Image: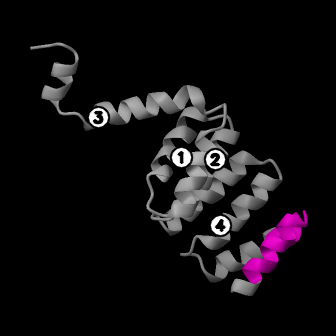
Amino acid sequence: MELLLSIGHFARVHRRFDEARYLFERMALLYPQRAFSYLGLGLVEIDRLNYRGASRWFGRALEAEPDSALALVWLGASQVLEGHYARGVRTLTTAATSDVPGASSMAAAFLQLPECAPYAGRVHAARVAASLSTIERLTIRGGY
Protein backbone atom coordinates (compact mmCIF):
# COMPACT_ATOMS: atom_id res chain seq x y z
CA MET A 1 0.00 0.00 0.00
CA GLU A 2 2.73 2.51 0.94
CA LEU A 3 4.62 1.76 -2.26
CA LEU A 4 1.51 2.37 -4.39
CA LEU A 5 0.84 5.58 -2.50
CA SER A 6 4.41 6.74 -3.14
CA ILE A 7 4.15 5.85 -6.82
CA GLY A 8 0.86 7.74 -7.07
CA HIS A 9 2.38 10.88 -5.56
CA PHE A 10 5.49 10.48 -7.72
CA ALA A 11 3.25 10.37 -10.81
CA ARG A 12 1.29 13.37 -9.57
CA VAL A 13 4.40 15.47 -8.92
CA HIS A 14 5.65 14.62 -12.41
CA ARG A 15 2.30 15.72 -13.87
CA ARG A 16 1.28 12.20 -14.88
CA PHE A 17 -2.23 12.89 -13.64
CA ASP A 18 -4.02 10.02 -15.39
CA GLU A 19 -1.64 7.46 -13.91
CA ALA A 20 -1.81 9.04 -10.44
CA ARG A 21 -5.60 9.15 -10.53
CA TYR A 22 -5.71 5.52 -11.68
CA LEU A 23 -3.56 4.38 -8.74
CA PHE A 24 -5.45 6.45 -6.15
CA GLU A 25 -8.82 5.27 -7.50
CA ARG A 26 -7.70 1.64 -7.21
CA MET A 27 -6.53 2.23 -3.65
CA ALA A 28 -9.90 3.83 -2.85
CA LEU A 29 -11.57 0.63 -4.04
CA LEU A 30 -9.30 -1.46 -1.82
CA TYR A 31 -9.45 0.86 1.20
CA PRO A 32 -12.75 2.80 1.02
CA GLN A 33 -12.75 3.66 4.73
CA ARG A 34 -9.29 5.23 4.67
CA ALA A 35 -8.60 8.86 3.76
CA PHE A 36 -5.21 8.52 2.05
CA SER A 37 -6.49 7.61 -1.43
CA TYR A 38 -9.07 10.43 -1.40
CA LEU A 39 -6.36 12.85 -0.29
CA GLY A 40 -4.24 11.74 -3.25
CA LEU A 41 -7.18 12.22 -5.63
CA GLY A 42 -7.81 15.68 -4.17
CA LEU A 43 -4.18 16.67 -4.62
CA VAL A 44 -4.33 15.54 -8.25
CA GLU A 45 -7.30 17.88 -8.73
CA ILE A 46 -5.46 20.76 -7.04
CA ASP A 47 -2.52 20.15 -9.36
CA ARG A 48 -4.95 20.29 -12.29
CA LEU A 49 -6.45 23.54 -10.88
CA ASN A 50 -9.83 21.83 -10.43
CA TYR A 51 -10.56 23.14 -6.94
CA ARG A 52 -14.22 22.13 -6.90
CA GLY A 53 -13.23 18.54 -7.68
CA ALA A 54 -10.53 18.72 -5.03
CA SER A 55 -13.08 19.88 -2.44
CA ARG A 56 -15.27 16.88 -3.26
CA TRP A 57 -12.38 14.45 -2.79
CA PHE A 58 -11.29 16.04 0.49
CA GLY A 59 -14.90 15.87 1.65
CA ARG A 60 -14.85 12.15 0.86
CA ALA A 61 -11.63 11.82 2.87
CA LEU A 62 -13.42 13.40 5.85
CA GLU A 63 -16.37 11.05 5.40
CA ALA A 64 -13.96 8.12 5.55
CA GLU A 65 -11.97 9.53 8.49
CA PRO A 66 -13.84 12.38 10.23
CA ASP A 67 -10.86 13.09 12.51
CA SER A 68 -8.38 13.57 9.65
CA ALA A 69 -6.82 16.96 10.31
CA LEU A 70 -4.90 16.78 7.05
CA ALA A 71 -8.13 16.27 5.07
CA LEU A 72 -9.62 19.26 6.89
CA VAL A 73 -6.63 21.45 5.99
CA TRP A 74 -6.76 20.51 2.32
CA LEU A 75 -10.54 20.93 2.23
CA GLY A 76 -10.17 24.45 3.63
CA ALA A 77 -7.37 25.28 1.21
CA SER A 78 -9.36 24.06 -1.78
CA GLN A 79 -12.41 26.02 -0.61
CA VAL A 80 -10.29 29.19 -0.50
CA LEU A 81 -8.79 28.44 -3.91
CA GLU A 82 -12.30 27.81 -5.23
CA GLY A 83 -13.28 31.32 -4.12
CA HIS A 84 -15.34 30.31 -1.07
CA TYR A 85 -13.19 32.41 1.25
CA ALA A 86 -15.40 32.58 4.35
CA ARG A 87 -16.11 28.84 4.28
CA GLY A 88 -12.45 28.04 3.67
CA VAL A 89 -11.31 30.28 6.53
CA ARG A 90 -13.79 28.60 8.89
CA THR A 91 -12.51 25.18 7.85
CA LEU A 92 -8.86 26.22 8.12
CA THR A 93 -9.45 27.84 11.50
CA THR A 94 -10.86 24.56 12.78
CA ALA A 95 -7.85 22.71 11.38
CA ALA A 96 -5.44 25.24 12.93
CA THR A 97 -6.65 24.23 16.39
CA SER A 98 -5.76 20.61 15.68
CA ASP A 99 -3.20 18.94 17.89
CA VAL A 100 -1.60 17.41 14.77
CA PRO A 101 1.49 19.63 14.37
CA GLY A 102 1.88 19.39 10.59
CA ALA A 103 -1.79 19.98 9.95
CA SER A 104 -2.09 22.92 12.33
CA SER A 105 0.97 24.65 10.88
CA MET A 106 -0.26 24.10 7.31
CA ALA A 107 -3.65 25.55 8.22
CA ALA A 108 -1.99 28.55 9.85
CA ALA A 109 0.10 29.10 6.70
CA PHE A 110 -2.96 28.95 4.44
CA LEU A 111 -4.74 31.41 6.74
CA GLN A 112 -1.94 33.90 5.96
CA LEU A 113 -3.03 34.09 2.31
CA PRO A 114 -4.18 37.62 1.41
CA GLU A 115 -7.57 36.24 0.35
CA CYS A 116 -8.19 34.99 3.87
CA ALA A 117 -7.36 38.22 5.73
CA PRO A 118 -10.81 39.85 5.53
CA TYR A 119 -12.47 36.70 6.86
CA ALA A 120 -9.97 35.50 9.46
CA GLY A 121 -10.75 38.33 11.89
CA ARG A 122 -14.50 37.75 11.59
CA VAL A 123 -14.16 34.03 12.29
CA HIS A 124 -11.97 34.70 15.33
CA ALA A 125 -14.38 37.35 16.68
CA ALA A 126 -17.35 35.03 16.18
CA ARG A 127 -15.60 32.20 18.04
CA VAL A 128 -14.67 34.49 20.92
CA ALA A 129 -18.22 35.82 21.13
CA ALA A 130 -19.64 32.31 21.07
CA SER A 131 -17.40 31.29 23.94
CA LEU A 132 -18.49 34.14 26.19
CA SER A 133 -21.36 33.68 28.57
CA THR A 134 -24.38 35.98 28.44
CA ILE A 135 -23.22 37.84 31.55
CA GLU A 136 -19.77 38.40 30.05
CA ARG A 137 -21.31 39.74 26.82
CA LEU A 138 -23.53 42.14 28.72
CA THR A 139 -20.57 43.34 30.78
CA ILE A 140 -18.43 43.90 27.68
CA ARG A 141 -21.20 45.86 25.96
CA GLY A 142 -21.62 48.06 29.00
CA GLY A 143 -25.05 46.62 29.78
CA TYR A 144 -26.30 46.09 33.30
| Labelled disc at residue 38 | 4
Quadrant of the frame with the N terminus? bottom right
To which residue does mark 3 refer?
A: 130
Numbered badge on residue 117: none
Out of 20 and 134, give the one closest to the viewer.
134
Judging by the rendered image, the residue that carries numbered circle 1 is: 92
Q: Earlier in the sequence, mark 4 or mark 1?
A: 4
The x and y percentages for residue 136 are: 17, 28
Label 3 or label 4, whichever lies nearer to me, is 3
Q: What's the mark number on residue 77?
A: 2
Q: How is the image coloured?
A: one colour
Q: Nearer the viewer, residue 58 or 141?
A: 141
- What percent of the width, then of the height, locates residue 22? 81, 73
**Residue 111: x, y in percent?**
58, 41
Residue type at mark 2?
Ala
- State whether the magenta stretch is mostly helix, strand or loop: helix
CA gap, disc 1 to disc 3?
18 Å
135 vs 105, left or right, is left
Q: Give me the residue at 57% from left, 50% from top.
A: 107
Disc 3 residue type (three-letter): Ala
The answer to the question of whether label 2 and label 1 lie on touching residues, with beta carbons closer than 8 A, is: yes
97 in relation to 128, above or below: below
Farthest residue to the left: give it.
144
Determine the secondary structure under disc 2.
helix
Judge the density around disc 3: few (<14), some (14-19), many (≥20) Cα neighbours within 10 Å: few
Q: Which residues are magenta?
A: 4-20
Please give the count of numbered marks on the rendered protein. Answer: 4
Q: Is residue 18 magenta?
A: yes
